[in-house]
Amino acid sequence: MPEEAVQFPTASRDDAVRGILHRPAAKPVAGLVVTHGRSNDMKNPLVRRVAEAAEQHGLLAVRINFRYVDEKASASKDLSREEDDLLGAVRFLRKELPSAAIFVAGKSMGARVCARASADPDIAGVIALGYPLHPMFKPDVRNPPEWPKLAKPALFVQGDHDPFCDLARLREALPRLSCPYELRVIRNAGHSFEPKGEKRETFPAVWEAVYGWVRGFELSWA
């Protein structure tokens, strides 16, 4: 179905967030909010492709711009403002999906925002696409502030050449989470799953990981 430009209030209702809605042809079986990284927006190819694939597989998906993008500003230091934007999108989907599960997915910084918001009762699970566990090439920097706030089942999809997430560090950190988690590694891929080495398409492997994990929830699929 055609994409639909939408606008809705933040969770605190102090402003509005823009997004693109992807509505499946049949009744949606679940919802998905897709968020972008620090230096991009909802037009990012990975963000767009995740939302499109979700629609094709029966999910009602919305990809959003954090407000700072439209304001030509920067993200808030603690990402609390972006959390407000994300939860506004979750409330927007909840109005259309009174009882279906709603998942939140984030690319890079967007995954940190999803972790911050994960305790919200309307969120069923978190999908981290290239989680920035530490600054670029600095795996010795530990304890991202939102890590203890990750309260729902989480999927981590990581490229094995991601300079923002050393896999050894991630594997060390994951068992410290209080929630169930799964790690899927995309071989020879970078932070945005760009191929390293031979030229190839990595998105099918990314989506297979995402869709397989979502299907693992007890949902009423059509």
Image: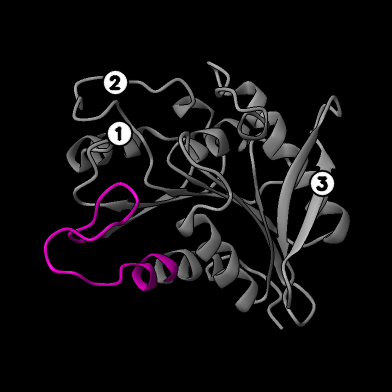
Write down the residue under mark 3: 7
Tag 1 or tag 3, which sits nearer the N-term?
3
Per the image, is 221 magenta? Answer: no
The residue located at (68%, 79%) in the rendering is 221
Q: How is the image coloured?
A: one colour
Marks 3 and 2, how far apart at CA: 37 Å
Q: Going by the picture, which residue comes out furthest to the top?
A: 77
**Residue 198 x %, y %:** 13, 68
| 3D distance between C-alphas at marks 2 and 1 | 9 Å
The image shows residue 27 at horizontal and vertical percentages of 80, 77
- In the picture of the structure, the residue carrying the numbered disc 1 is 173
Q: Amino acid at mark 1?
A: Ala
Residue 188, magenta (yes or no): yes
Q: Residue at x 56, y 43 (%)?
A: 152
Relative image position of residue 122 (x, y in whole percent): 74, 46
Camera-nearest residue between 84 and 98: 84
Q: Residues within 10 Å of mark 1 (few under 14, many from 20)?
A: some
> Between marks 3 and 1, how big is the CA–CA gap?
37 Å
| Quadrant holding the C terminus | bottom right
Q: Which residue is mark 2?
A: 142
Closer to the camera: disc 3 or disc 2?
3
> Is 72 above or below relative to 152?
above
Image vertical order of residue 158 relative to residue 38, above or below: below
Where's residue 181, x and y in %? 42, 49
SS assignment at label 1 = helix
Residue drawn at the location 71% of the way across and 30% of the way down: 84
Label 2 residue SS: loop
Residue 185 sits in quarter: bottom left
**Would you say the residues marked 2 and 1 are in contact, meaning their CB atoms lie under 8 Å apart?**
yes
Residues in magenta, as a range: 186-207
Q: Using a 10 Å C-alpha cutoff, classify the residue at mark 3 as few (fewer than 14 neighbours), some (14 to 19) or many (20 or more).
A: some
